[in-house]
Image: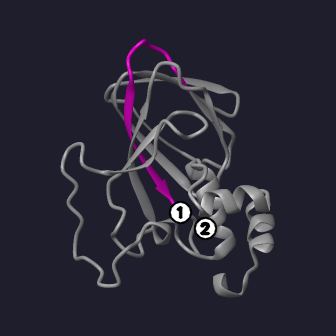
Amino acid sequence: MAAKASQSDVAKRAGITKSNLSKIETGQISSPIGTLLSIAGALGVRLAEFFQESSNPPKFILTRKGKGDVIVRDGSHLGYSYEALAVNYPNKPLEPFILTVSPGDEEGHFVHPGQEFIYMISGKIEFTLGQEKIPLEEGDSLYFDPSVAHSLKLLSEENARFLCIFIEPSK
C-alpha cells in the first residue's frame, strides 16, 4: 500500500498538509507521536517501521538508563522529549518511551488512535481526558483511550518524567 500511495494521498489520509508531510520526511520539523501514528495508519504500517534500521531483526532490545534514542526533543513544537526505549525491535504492537516535560513547555493537546499507558516516574502533571482533570504524580499510572481528546500540563517547577506506551490499533 505504501509504495503505491502518493505524498498527497498519504497526507490526506493522515489529516495533515502535504507540505507538513514533506517537512517531516526531510527532517525539517519534528512531529508529535499522534501525527506519526496517523501517518503510519495512512501508510498501513506500524510506527516502529519509521525508525527501523536493520534487516536482521534482533531477539531483544536492551536500553540502558538514559541511553534511549531521542525521537522528539526541544525542537518539537511543544518542547517535549521522547526517549525511545525499543526503536529497533520489529513488528511490535506498542512503542515505549520515557517522556520528559519541562517548565516552559507548552501544554500539549492530542487525539490519536490506539491505546495508551503512562506511569509517572517523577514530577507532577495534570492530565485532562475529555472533560476530566486527573492529577498524576510519582508512582501513579493511567491507561486510557487516546481517541478521546487529552492534554497534559506540568504542575511543578521541576521536570515531569513518565513511561509512555503507545499501543497501536490492531491491523
* Residue 152 quadrant: top right
Judge whether 60 appears above or below 117 on screen: below
Per the picture, the main secondary structure of the magenta-coloured stretch is strand
Q: Element type at marker 1? A: loop
Residue 168 image position (x, y, % from top left): 53, 63
Is residue 113 visible from the viewing direction of this image? no
Residue found 46% across the figure and 67% down from its top: 48
Residue found 65% across the figure and 81% down from its top: 2
* Residue 158 quadrant: top left
Q: Pointers 2 and 1 in contact (CB under 8 A)? A: yes
Crowd tier of the residue under label 1, counting other residues whose Cα lies within 10 Å: few below 14, some 14–19, many 20 or above: many
Judge whether 160 appears above or below 65 on screen: above
Query: Could you tell whether 133 is left or right of 155 in the image?
Result: right
Is residue 126 visible from the viewing direction of this image? yes
Which quarter of the image is occupied by the N terminus? bottom right
**Residue bearing mark 2:** 40
Q: Residue furthest top?
A: 157
**Residue bearing mark 1:** 168
Residue 24 image position (x, y, % from top left): 62, 58
Tell which of 27 and 21 is nearer to you: 27
Instruction: Tell me, yes or no, whether the highlighted magenta stretch contains residue 82.
Output: no
